[in-house]
Image (spheres, rainbow, N blue to C red):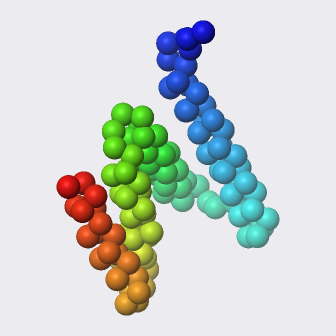
C-alpha cells in the first residue's frame, strides 16, 4: 500500500519537533536547577535565535539527505565545531590552539575535495 501524499515530509518534521521541544525543556530544567532560576527576558531573543538556527540546521540536513548530496551535507555539518571555536574567539576573545587551527584547516580543505 503506498504512503499518503506528504506522509514522508510529516514523518520527518514531527519527530524533529518533539526532539527539539524535549531538548529545550530538559535544558531549561537543568539550567534552573543549576542556577536556581531561568535566564532573564533580555536573553530571550538570543536564545530564540540559537534555537531557530539549530532547527534550521537540522531541517536543511534532512532536506539535503532527501533531495541533495548527503556526502556534501555531512562534510558541511561537520564544520559546526569550527563555527563554535571561531565565535568563542570573536565574542569571548579565547585563543585558538594549534590543534583547533589544524582541525579547522583540514575541514575547510575537505569541503572542495568532496564536492569536486
Is any atom of residue 69 visible in this view?
yes
- The image position of residue 46, as x and y in percent, is 48, 57
**Residue at point 34% right, 70% down?**
107
- The image position of residue 106, as x and y in percent, is 32, 75
- The image position of residue 71, as x and y in percent, is 37, 51
Identify whether 12 is placed above or below 40.
Answer: above
- The image position of residue 37, as x and y in percent, is 74, 63
- What is the number of callouts on the image? 0
- Residue 40, by quadrant, is bottom right
**Residue at point 42% right, 62% down?**
78
Residue 29 left/right relative to 58: right
In which quadrant will I find the C terminus? bottom left
**Residue at point 53% right, 55% down?**
47
Return the residue nearer the eye: 44 or 64.
64
- Residue 7, by quadrant, is top right
**Residue at point 66% right, 38% down?**
18
Amino acid at each position: 500500500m503506498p504512503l499518503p501524499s506528504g506522509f514522508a515530509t510529516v514523518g520527518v518534521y514531527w519527530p524533529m519537533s518533539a526532539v527539539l521541544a524535549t531538548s529545550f525543556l530538559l535544558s531549561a530544567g537543568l539550567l534552573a536547577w543549576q542556577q536556581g532560576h531561568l535566564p532573564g527576558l533580555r536573553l530571550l531573543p538570543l536564545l530564540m535565535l540559537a534555537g531557530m538556527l539549530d532547527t534550521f540546521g537540522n531541517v536543511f540536513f534532512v532536506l539535503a539527505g532527501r533531495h541533495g548530496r548527503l556526502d556534501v551535507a555531512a562534510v558541511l555539518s561537520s564544520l559546526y565545531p569550527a563555527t563554535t571555536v571561531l565565535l568563542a574567539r570573536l565574542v569571548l576573545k579565547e585563543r585558538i590552539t594549534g590543534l583547533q587551527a589544524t582541525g579547522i584547516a583540514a575541514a575547510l580543505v575537505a569541503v572542495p575535495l568532496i564536492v569536486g
